[in-house]
C-alpha cells in the first residue's frame, strides 16, 4: 500500500512562506494587545481575504483560491502560530461554512454566497451546538418549519464562533420531531434574515480576540433555496463537515505547539540560573526535546490526514481527521504546560506570551468535538 507523500509541492512551500511572513509581520505583533482588549482584528481578516485565505477550498469560479487540504492545514498552522484567535476565525469560515455550502449547496446558492465569503468581504459561522446539545449533537431542538417558499426557524444556538461578525451561518435544525438524527436539516442563515439575532459575547478563558456568542431564531425566515442537501440530511452534513473541519483544529493546535516550543527555547537560552543559561541543564534540554518530538509527530499526522482527505472518497479520511485532532490538540496542551513550567514564575505572568498560549490551547481538546468524542468516532470506525 502506498501512503500519501509528505514532500510539499513548490506551490505549498510558497504558500507556507508567504503566510508565515504575513503572520509574523502582521498578526503576531498585536496579538497580546488584542487579547487584552478582546479586540476582533477586522483589518487583518480583510487582508487575509485579499490573500485568498478565507476561501481556500472555494474554486476560482466562485471567487476562491481552490487550494488542497494540505495547503490549508499549512496555512492554518502558520496563522495560529502567530495568533490562535485569528486561526479559529479563519478555520471556521473556510471549513464549517464555505465547505458545506460548496459541497451541499445548489449552484444558485453557491453563486449567491461563496464569492462574498471567499473574498473575505464577510465571514462565516456554523450553528450546530445548543445549550442542551453539545457532544450529543443529534439532541438539538431548534426547529424549522416549511411555509411556502420559506423555512421558519425557532430556537437557540450556543458557543458560535464568529457570531457578531459573520454574515452567513450554516445552521442545523429539526424539521421532523419524530425522526431522531434523520429529522435534521441544514440551512444557510444570513445575519440579516428577519427574526435572527446574536446574544452577548461569551467571557472566555482564551481565544479572546475571536468572537463567540449565542444565536437566536424567533420566527426567523430563510428562503427555501438556502437549504443544503435534502430535507433530513442535516445530521450527515454536519458530521461530514466535522470530518473535514477537525483538520483545521489539528492544524491550529500544531501552530500553537510550534510557538510554545519557540518560546521555551528562547527563554531557556536567555534565562540564567545556577551560574548559566537554564538551557545548559539537562532537565530543561529533555523538556525541549519532548516538546519538539511531539510537535513533529502531530504535524506529520495532521499533514498525513490532510493528504488522505485530498484523496476524495478515501474511507479512512474521517478517522484520520479525528486522530489528528485528538493527538495534535492533546500534544499542544502538554507542550504549553511544559513550556509554561520551563518559564517558571514568569510564565504565570500575562506579560509573557506563553500565558496567552496556555489559555488559548485549552479549548482545542474541546471544540469541534471533545477528545472523548474523537475517541468514540475513531473506535467506532475501527470496530465497524
Ligand atoms: N459522515 C456521514 N454520516 C455520518 C457520520 C459521518 N462522519 N457519522 C455518523 N453518520 C451518520 C450515521 O451513519 C448514522 O446514519 P443512519 O441514521 O443512516 O444510520 C447517523 O449519522 C447517526 O450516526 P451515529 O449513530 O453515530 O450518531 P450519534 O448520535 O451516536 O452521534 C457523535 C455521533 C460522533 C457523538 C456526534 O454526535 C458528534 O460528532 N458529536 C460531537 C459534536 C461536535 O463535534 N460538535 C462540534 C460543534 S462545532 C464547533 O465546535 C465549531 C467551533 O466553534 C470551532
Image (tube, helix red, strand yellow):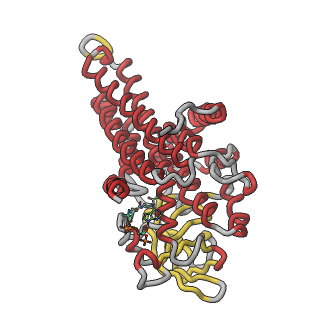
Residue 258 shows up from this direction: yes
Quarter assignment of residue 116: bottom right
Q: Nearer the viewer, residue 314 or 29?
A: 314
Q: Position of residue 295 (x, y in %)?
A: 40, 33
Identity of the residue furthest to the bottom in this view: 148
16 lies above or below 198: above
Where on the image, by quarter, is ligand 1? bottom left
Q: Is residue 311 left or right of residue 374?
A: right
Please state the total of marks drawn on the protein image. 0
148 lies above or below 354: below
At a point 45% along the width and 74% down the height, the residue shown is: 156
Quarter assignment of residue 47: top right
Residue 352 shows up from this direction: no
Q: Position of residue 176 (x, y in %)?
A: 47, 83
Q: Position of residue 102 (x, y in %)?
A: 63, 61
Q: Nearer the viewer, residue 201 or 309?
A: 309
At a point 62% along the width and 75% down the height, the residue shown is: 193
Q: Is residue 294 left or right of residue 259?
A: left
Q: Position of residue 184 (x, y in %)?
A: 48, 76
Query: Considering the image in quadrants, where does the C terminus appear?
Result: bottom left
Identity of the residue furthest to the front in this view: 1
Identity of the residue furthest to the top in this view: 275
Q: Nearer the viewer, residue 287 or 194?
A: 287
At a point 61% along the width and 51% down the height, the residue shown is: 42
Amino acid at each position: 500500500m502506498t501512503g500519501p507523500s509528505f514532500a510539499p509541492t513548490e506551490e505549498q512551500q510558497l504558500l507556507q512562506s508567504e503566510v508565515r511572513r504575513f503572520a509574523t509581520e502582521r498578526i503576531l505583533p498585536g496579538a497580546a494587545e488584542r487579547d487584552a482588549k478582546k479586540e476582533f482584528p477586522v483589518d487583518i481578516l480583510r487582508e487575509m481575504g485579499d490573500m485568498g485565505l478565507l476561501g481556500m477550498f472555494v474554486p476560482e469560479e466562485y471567487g476562491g483560491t481552490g487550494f488542497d487540504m494540505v495547503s490549508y492545514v499549512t496555512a492554518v498552522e502558520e496563522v495560529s502560530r502567530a495568533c490562535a484567535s485569528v486561526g479559529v476565525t479563519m478555520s471556521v469560515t473556510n471549513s464549517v461554512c464555505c465547505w458545506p455550502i460548496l459541497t451541499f449547496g445548489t449552484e444558485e446558492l453557491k453563486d449567491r454566497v461563496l464569492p462574498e465569503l471567499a473574498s473575505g468581504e464577510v465571514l462565516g459561522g456554523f450553528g450546530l451546538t445548543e445549550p442542551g446539545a453539545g457532544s450529543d449533537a443529534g439532541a438539538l431542538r431548534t426547529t424549522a418549519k416549511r411555509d411556502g417558499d420559506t423555512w421558519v426557524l425557532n430556537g437557540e444556538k450556543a458557543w458560535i464562533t464568529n457570531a457578531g461578525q459573520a454574515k452567513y451561518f450554516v445552521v442545523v435544525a429539526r424539521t421532523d420531531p419524530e425522526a431522531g438524527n434523520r429529522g435534521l436539516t441544514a440551512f444557510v442563515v444570513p445575519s440579516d434574515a428577519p427574526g435572527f439575532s446574536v446574544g452577548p459575547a461569551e467571557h472566555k478563558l482564551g481565544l479572546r480576540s475571536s468572537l463567540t456568542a449565542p444565536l437566536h431564531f424567533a420566527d426567523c425566515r430563510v428562503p427555501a433555496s438556502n437549504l443544503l442537501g435534502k430535507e433530513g440530511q442535516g445530521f450527515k452534513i454536519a458530521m461530514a463537515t466535522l470530518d473535514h473541519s477537525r483538520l483545521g483544529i489539528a492544524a491550529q493546535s500544531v501552530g500553537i505547539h510550534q510557538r510554545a516550543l519557540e518560546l521555551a527555547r528562547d527563554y531557556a537560552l536567555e534565562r540564567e540560573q545556577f551560574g548559566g543559561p537554564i538551557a545548559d541543564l539537562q532537565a530543561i534540554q529533555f523538556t525541549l526535546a519532548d516538546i519538539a518530538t511531539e510537535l513533529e509527530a502531530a504535524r506529520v499526522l495532521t499533514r498525513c490526514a490532510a493528504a488522505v482527505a485530498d484523496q476524495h472518497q478515501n474511507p479512512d479520511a474521517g478517522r484520520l481527521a479525528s486522530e489528528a485532532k485528538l493527538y495534535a490538540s492533546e500534544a499542544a496542551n502538554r507542550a504549553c504546560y511544559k513550556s509554561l513550567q520551563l518559564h517558571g514564575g514568569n510564565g504565570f505572568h500575562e506579560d509573557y506570551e506563553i500565558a496567552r498560549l496556555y489559555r488559548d490551547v485549552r479549548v482545542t481538546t474541546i471544540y469541534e468535538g471533545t477528545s472523548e468524542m474523537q475517541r468514540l468516532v475513531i473506535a467506532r470506525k475501527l470496530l465497524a
